[in-house]
Amino acid sequence: MLKGKTFVQLTDEERSKIEVLLHQGFSYSRIASLLGRSISTVSREVGRNGSGQYFCKRAQLLTDKRHRLKRKHSVFDHTMKLFISENLRTIRLSPELIAVQGKKLRADFICAEWIYRWIWRMKFSQKADDKPFQALFKYLRHAGRKRKRGNKRNNRGNLLQRVWIDERPECVELRQRKGDLECDIMLGKDRKPGLLVALDRISRRAWLRRLKTKNARYVATVLQSICRQCGRVKSITFDNDQSFAEHYRLHELGIKTYFTHPYSSQEKGSVENRIGLIRMFFPKQSDFSKISSREVKKVESIINERPMRMFNYKTPNQLYEKS
């Protein structure tokens, strides 16, 4: 049936009627009139699927087979694959963010779920054309995550002037203002000092600094430098690492400090989440003595320009400037 310029395929019911009417001796023109189809449609249907005598079930099977074997236009072309590979390898965008960016360039860009399925299919593919994409799964954020189990007792040392997170003001807890930070240390190879990571809770803007040592006074000095650069820092939340033992030096800048409960990393989940992202650029066995401050600064820039779904794909830099 023609509707404008669109052809609608014959249905199972129509094929069944054609079978019955043919067996009753009706002509092609009469059948076409009863179905509201053109004579050529009925004639072509019987010619393709009749093979001497027309049966609707066999006709449907033959039609389905032709559709499966028919050459189809591929939306997911090599250009799209290269775009995904480049964004995943160089700036570590997630498949979801790649799909969002791709839609800005092409309306027919594939969805995130398709990207995930393709990446994992490439991992096990033995085709020569797929070889450049076989290792893409390694760039997925949780590709190699290992989970630890078991209870640990609290063997953290005492920290002078420590104030627990329970006493943190409600405005900090609810992320209602700029300048409330979370802070943590990301370790490198052999558990040696790696990066000091500070994060603004409301915008997720991050500051990264390469550490030479975990000495408490040195860490406090680096953190003071970050706070002076940030401006308007009001509070910082730490874990109970002894590297933060001289946190009280920040009080000189008018900054209040709070500590999570032992082994409760979820209480400063934002910075933990950012560290998970940073690990995509600097894996756990990274030797930070061989990584320059320029490389660290580049990664800081990348993650602060990374769109975030929870903020309607605005970047941390955009949010930090507005807040």
Image (tube, rainbow, N blue to C red):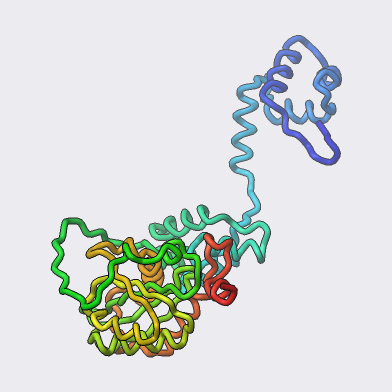
294 w.r.t. 309: above or below: below
**Image height check: is 14 above or below 301?**
above
* Number of numbered tags placed on the structure image: 0
Q: Position of residue 124 (x, y in %)?
A: 38, 57
**Quadrant location, the C terminus:** bottom right
- Residue at the location (53% across, 61% down)? 309
Report x, y in % for residue 314: 58, 67
Residue at the location (35% across, 75% down)? 183
Q: Quadrant of residue 98?
A: bottom right
**Position of 65 relative to 115 (above/below):** above
Residue 204 visible somewhere in the drawing:
yes
Which quadrant holds residue 191? Answer: bottom left
For the N terminus, the quadrant is top right
Residue depicted at x 50% and y 70% = 177
Q: Nearer the viewer, residue 296 or 241?
A: 241
Q: Is residue 255 left or right of residue 93?
A: left
In the rendered structure, the answer to whether residue 186 lies left or right of residue 13 reads: left
As drawn, which residue projects farthest toward the top? Answer: 24
Provide residue 5's location: percent of width, then percent of height. Answer: 84, 41
Q: Position of residue 11 (x, y in %)?
A: 69, 27
Is residue 135 visible in the rendered image? The answer is: no
Report the front residue among 82 and 43: 82
Q: Nearer the viewer, residue 81 or 57?
A: 81
Q: Is residue 115 left or right of residue 54?
A: left
